[in-house]
Image (spheres, rainbow, N blue to C red):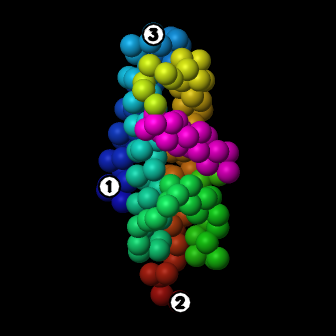
Amino acid sequence: MAEIKRELNRLECIAQQIEVNQNRLPERYELEISSALLQNFYKCCERILRLLAWEIRGTKARGINWRQRLLQEVTQQSKGLRPPIISGATREALHQLLALRNLIRNIYGYQLNPRDLKTLAHSIITLYPRVTQEIEHYKKLQLQKCRCHREPA
């Protein structure tokens, strides 16, 4: 849980950097910086979700499309073992950031659309509090579940 807490702190820093710059339409030379911040936000969320999923199943996601599978997995309830970690709306927002990540790996930064980046940056204003609230809620439920299992009958 300490590692997740560190990642949540990093996520906050990244979200603040994005928010500071979100009202500006990036100039061509700033596209790569803006896209890097958005990628960092996604990577941090992904790392947190991967850690939580690893705690549940004991293995790390691998293979083709593991990122899409991870997003799907953490949105579903796990057969009475755990509630969903994130909502479908959060999954969709993270999926858009994943799509940007995949796009950036295949094009040059100057080819990015500034308006698309601005739209994604603006979405972080609502996504950041939602994703952190959902993760904190999940952690709280898991902690309560652990306490229930420890209490004598």
The three-letter code of the residue at mark 1 reads Glu
Give the image location of residue 66, x and y in percent. Answer: 50, 60
- Residue 41 in view here: no
Q: What element carries label 2?
A: loop
The three-letter code of the residue at mark 3 reads Glu
CB under 8 Å between discs 2 and 3:
no
- Residue on which the image places disc 2: 153
Q: Identify the residue shown where x is 49% and y is 41%.
A: 102
Label annotation for residue 120: none
Q: Which residue lies furthest to the right in this view?
A: 88
CB under 8 Å between discs 1 and 3:
no
What is the spatial separation of the Cα atoms under label 2 and label 1, in whole angstroms?
Answer: 32 Å
The residue nearer to you, when weighing 84 against 60, is 60
- Residue on which the image places disc 1: 3
User: Which portion, as a residue range, is magenta?
Assistant: 88-106
Q: Identify the residue shown where x is 39% and y is 30%.
A: 36
Neighbours of disc 1 within 10 Å: few (<14), some (14-19), many (20+): few
Q: Identify the residue shown where x is 45% and y is 10%.
A: 27
Q: Report which quarter residue 124 is drawn in.
A: top right
Q: Report which quarter residue 62 is drawn in.
A: bottom left
Give the image location of residue 37, x and y in percent. Answer: 41, 30
